[in-house]
Image: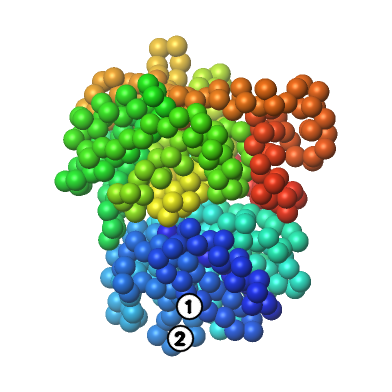
Amino acid sequence: MCGIFVIDGKHRQLQFDKSCKSLIHRGPDDFGSFFDEKAVLLHTRLSIIDLDGGKQPIFNEKADKCIICNGEIYNYTELKNELKNNHRFSTKSDSEIILHLYEDFGHNCLQMLNGMFAFAIYDNGNLFIARDRLGIKPLYYGYIDNSIVFASELKSLKMCFRIYEFPPGHYYISKKGFEGYYKVCGAEEEYFDEEEVSSLIREKLSESVKKRMMSDVPVGVFLSGGVDSSIIAALMKENSDRLYSFSVGIEGSEDLTAARVVAKYLETEHYEYVFTESEMVDIIDEVIYYLESFDAPLVRSAIPNFFVSKLAKKYVKVVLTGEGADELFCGYNYLKMIKNDKHLKRETLRLIHSLHNINLQRTDRMTMAHSIEARVPFLDHEFVEFALKIPMSLKKANDNRIEKYILRKAFESYLPYEIIWREKLKFSEGTGFEGLFKKISEKRFSDTEFLNEKRKTSMNIRSKDELFFYKIYHKLFSYLEDFRLSGVTLDF
């Protein structure tokens, strides 16, 4: 995992020197650069694959093209075997395969990649830049003078007068602009037999997990004790003799207790950290700095993510998480209220399209704050496409059926009964501190003060704890007041 910073157009040395420093947490192991009068490519590297030989930028054979990449390409070995007769590979890095695919197939190379990525290719004075299908890896852009600037995080675009999110499933070409290449859409339901669906879920998710265990450094799992992370841990254990697992919470929290049960059952090398309310208050500015958001539910869920990432950093450089299962398998409690299957499917699609601004943003930022890489097996695009073909009748909850029924059913022999059928809790609930910042903000802001503060900003401040977080955000990122998130049109 890495940080990238790119300028398409004229530039000044001072600008990109300062911007790159703000990405060093994403890649403290190495630094690489390429620039001429038309473009700048800067890369901060977190070494995961080809530790000694994977320095970026990576150049092609003629040295007229190069790439910098943030992410992992899980099918690079297969792709490399297909191209090895036509190209000379200078590294063992998974990123290099993108460059040679681009040489042969142009922007169509994106359809061949299985992974998470945000990359930039310099091509004889022009730039080709792309973001993965679901937005697992972040990318933003802004304008300064007559140039367009791209970066992994908002804080690196401080010099820009307008900043936007680079939309998932899109690419950019110099002088042509942005073009979409992928969109998650509704699919015809294909699988109706419960046993067949369960078998396919096991097979496809197991393959997704196996792909995401490729690494030249130790790999672990964030283990909350919930069904999603526990399933990922069980599948990882099938492919590893030594599995590191990590859990956090306040003293007596449900997640810590459940995670201990799973860790003992799977015989993982388990580590946990019990944090206090005062520690949460102490690190809240830091969390918001790395998260780049004041959204109250997102900030609250980011706090345990921050602590568990800090814990994992001591032992591993890569972790797998259970992100995406709730969106694919109707795991959220409010979805029970949607009785119409067509409406329910539309809502799950909206959730999937929103992930890059919510759970994926939290997971990326909190892990990268501690220079570790998070991988999300449930969001392999092939698994997502398969899951969308499973009927709502096998996913949705009702009075007699728990949420994510078919996912639980598929893995009921993999985990203890009390884990696989455990009711879902929000991360902040399971770790035991859901109401802390609500109490703090109630004491800090009267109802009148809250309404007055809301009127002072164009931001949609929904609660007192969100106002508390916004005050910190504004202090850190006042230049992002007009930041606009990209909209995604749903067409299904």
- View extreme (left): residue: 241
The 10 Å Cα crowd at callout 2, few under 14, some 14 to 19, many 20 or more, is few
Query: Which of the 4 image quadrants contains residue 396?
Result: top left
Looking at the picture, tell me which residue is in the foreground, 130 or 416: 416
What residue is rendered at 53% in x and 72% in y? 42
Q: Secondary structure at mark 2?
A: loop
Looking at the picture, the colour scheme in use is rainbow
The 10 Å Cα crowd at callout 1, few under 14, some 14 to 19, many 20 or more, is many
Q: Locate residue 52 relative to residue 9 in the image: left or right.
A: left
Residue for badge 2: 63
What residue is rendered at 26% in x and 37% in y? 270
The percent position of residue 223, horizontal first and vertical second, equals 34, 35
Any mark on residue 104, and which? none
- Contact between labelled residues 2 and 1, with CB atoms less than 8 Å apart: yes
Asked if one can make out residue 491 in the rendered structure from this viewpoint, the answer is no
Vertical relation: 319 (above or below) 440: below
Residue for badge 1: 66
The quarter in which the C terminus is drawn is: top right
Looking at the picture, tell me which residue is in the foreground, 353 or 55: 55
Vertical relation: 188 (above or below) 261: below
Check disc 1 and give the amino acid type. Answer: Cys
Q: Locate residue 268 relative to residue 292 in the image: left or right.
A: left
